[in-house]
Image: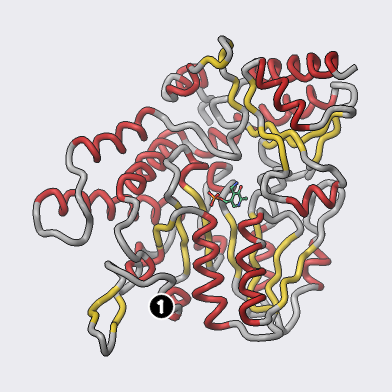
Amino acid sequence: MPALDVQKLRKDFPNLNLKVYGKPLVYLDNAATTFKPQYVVDAISNHYAHGASNVHRGVHFLSEQATKAYEDSRQTVKVFLNAKSTQEIIFTRGTTESINLVAQSFGRTFFKEGDEILISAMEHHSNIVPWQILCQQIGCTLKVAPMNQKGELLYEEFVRLLTPKTRLVAMVYVSNSLGTINPIARVIKEAHSRNIPVLVDGAQAVTHHPVDVQALDCDFFAFSGHKIFGPTGIGVLYGKQQFLESMPPYQGGGDMIASVSFAKTTYNVLPYKFEAGTPAIAEVIGLNAAIKYVQAIGLENMAAYKKELLFYGTNILCSVPGVRLIGTAREKTSILSFVVEGIHPHDLGTIVDEDGVAIRTGHHCTQPVMEFFKVPATARASLAFYNTKEEIDILVKAIYRAKEIFK
Ligand code: PMP
């Protein structure tokens, strides 16, 4: 496996040259959102500068060009996820919208009072709240599979919670606040052995390693463009065709119809049935560029390097007196959540920011995880393939400075 030339690749990202408070920026907030390579920025600005037009609507040159670029991106996503067909690739605003779509279209249509939806204890709010809304609407119940003190799914407990009433398992693949990689293939197999479909929240997983939805055999898979070096405002819902065919539209409007009259409206074929209104065309084009960028480097190459960074970061953070890692799963990705004794994470975040270090502090949209670990918040350094050991050292130095201040 070729080693990454990180210094060379860093040049692709204009933001990595930024200075904050006169200091070089150390960006360690990649789980919140990733920086965009110039290649992606160019793809978006090229669309606006040389041919911005609407898709699927005109026969004129620019509209056809925009439509082709838009549908090319769908093809790229199809290959990226190894979906069977582009009909299974729905463009949404992001992971959040993808999950809400499934809750409101699939759940609201096919679940009934007393049915159960099973999630895990480490879900992002976007894989909790849509199900709670659905539960309020139709009277179904949300069940939660617990985790252990390392932040690992208690698999036997998960299996125990699968009942004849379970209609869906919705689970995060890679936890954004703990870094845990869930045994998602096993989860899917287990659920399928009871004929229960599975939705995978892949928001953090897509940058971690290649995803093959056919090999996983998941029924739905959601991710966001901005976590994989692409634009905000664009995401994907993959769904197996037989499910998507059976589901009613999520929103009504232009593009999602075959014909409209006041008496009766018929809907468009997949995937357009779920893409009402003018879509985020530039963002779809940007996502295409982002995926191609990632594919050119190779997710496996990135993962191997990030594993090194994780090992280095874990060791050095654990050597700092008073630092406690939150999330120590055996299988984890390059996310380091931690607390420092005697310093509130928000204070820590503010102090390291003065040294140019951007980390995330807070509950990371996983309040139940904070409650489980009995902490108000954590500080989180989330590492991308463009980060370096030197940057981790700068973070650690900044933590020591914070400790001096709070001594
Ligand atoms: N799930 C996970 C695991 C996430 O990390 C995030 C983003 N932090 C989301 C869901 C929601 O993604 P978005 O805000 O892009 O819709």
Q: Position of residue 126 (x, y in %)?
A: 61, 57
Number of marks in picture? 1
Ligand 1 has an atom within 8 Å of the beta carbon of the residue at disc 1: no
- Image quadrant of residue 3? top right
* Residue 221 in view (yes/no): yes
Residue type pointed to by label 1: Glu
* Residue 192 in view (yes/no): no
Q: Is residue 303 above or below residue 93?
A: above
Q: Is residue 21 above or below residue 78?
A: above
Q: Which residue is mark 1?
A: 245
- Image quadrant of residue 381? top right
* SS category of the residue bearing label 1: helix
- Badge 1 local density, few (<14 within 10 Å), some, or many (20+)? some
Q: Is residue 287 left or right of residue 203?
A: left
Identified at 69% across, 15% down, the residue is: 394
Q: Residue furthest top?
A: 22
- Image quadrant of residue 292? top left
Q: Considering the image in quadrants, where does the C terminus appear?
A: top right
Depth check: give the residue in front, 283 or 404. Answer: 404
Q: Residue furthest front?
A: 262
Q: Is residue 13 left or right of residue 211?
A: left
Identified at 73% across, 54% down, the residue is: 122
Q: Residue furthest left?
A: 60
Q: Position of residue 41 (x, y in %)?
A: 35, 32
